[in-house]
Amino acid sequence: MTTRTRLAITALAAILLAAVAVGYTKLSAAPESNVAAGGVIGPRLQVLSNGRLSTVSRTDPCGPREVSEQLCDRAYAAAGTVACLRPVGALKSGELAVLDAELHEQRTVPLTGFPNRARVSASGRMVAWTLFVDGHSYAANGFSTSTGILDTRTGALVTSLEEFVPDRAADTNFWGVTFAADDNRFYATMSTGGHRYLVEGDFAARSVKPVQDNVECPSLSPDGTRIAYKAAIDGDPQRGWRLSVLDLATKRITPLAETRSVDDQPAWLDDHDVAYGIQRGDGVNDVWTVPADGTGSARVLVPEANSPAPLG
């Protein structure tokens, strides 16, 4: 064997050993950065892990997760459209980034405020967001929000739902949009005069109408018949919120088995269960789930994560 051949073999061996070491490091990392071989297969759930867009298996949500480099403060996804509210930096304001299923950027919308809620319609066409403009809590006095909607197909952009109420009071705020299947109707929370109302909106007509009192952060069920939401205890947000479900036809309200205060916009996993984030005492968020009919009990779905969105 020639000297040149021996050197070539030695170099190749070094490269292979380095590759094995890198692969071992990735697979030995903490759970939030662990990537299943070949990616997460089958039905998936999108979450944020340490602020990064990630996916986990719906059948093993506490197992390995695939973590991207995309940073978001809030996110949601449906039908290949991902809404990412990017963090506000020290020298820059935030923005909405609309991404495709491969997380390639399709469009951005500059925004001013602190990211709070994001939603995508079931078809992937409509995108909505809410930001705090003043204040950082729905329980505080004097907060204000900015809530907008983007039609990704036509490019129609409404930067503030307040435009839908021409004679609005000065204290009018909107937050927490959820879309109906026709990509025109939507539901949201409107606050004015000390009350928080569920309103039904018509995007084409640029109008909203009240439906129910004391409904915040609504989420329409896949079958379009129910709204999961947070209800201020005794109508007072400073006492916390109870996760509940409203039947739109009968107006019957069902408090869910989660009895802790939930300050989140729930996400329907299917027609039977909802998911939501709860912050621990150490500041870390976990995604929990509970049956939507008031039975059962709450359980952790994805530890150390938030912003759940079923991907199928």
Image (spheres, rainbow, N blue to C red):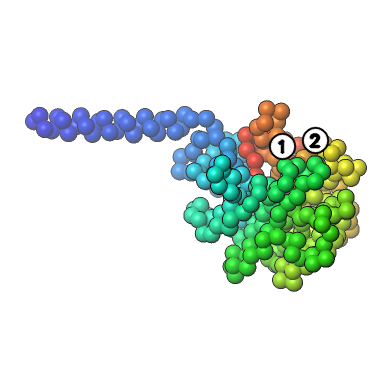
Q: Which residue is mark 2?
A: 260
Whole-angstrom CA distance, mark 1 to mark 2, is: 9 Å
Q: Position of residue 54 (x, y in %)?
A: 55, 43
Q: Quick check: 155 above or below 129?
A: below
Residue 222: % across, % down: 72, 57
Between residue 134 and residue 164, name the one nearer to us: 134
Dot 1: element: strand
| The quarter of the displayed image where residue 10 is located | top left
Mark toward the start of the polypeptide (1 vs 2): 2
Q: Are marks 1 and 2 in contact (CB under 8 Å)?
A: yes
Where residue 46 sits in the image (x, y, percent)? 59, 46
* Position of residue 24 in the picture relative to residue 281 (left or right): left
- Number of residues whose C-alpha sits closer than 10 Å to that of mark 2, classed few (under 14), some (14–19) or many (20 or more): few
- Residue 275: name its quadrant: top right
Quadrant of the image for the N terminus? top left
Task: Give how far across and how far down residue 278 sits, in percent.
Answer: 71, 37
Q: Amino acid at mark 1?
A: Ile
Residue 238 seen in the figure: yes
User: Considering depth in this image, is 309 or 42 the residue closer to the camera?
Assistant: 309
| 212 shown above or below 241 | below
Find residue 128 and name its label: none
Q: Residue at x 75, y 50 (%)?
A: 144
**166 shown above or below 25:** below
Residue at 84% across, 42% down: 237
Crowding near pointer 1: few (<14 within 10 Å), some, many (20+)? many
Please tell me which residue is depicted at 86% across the width and 37% down the height of the picture. 239
Outermost residue to the left: 2
Question: Which residue carries the number 1 mark?
Answer: 278
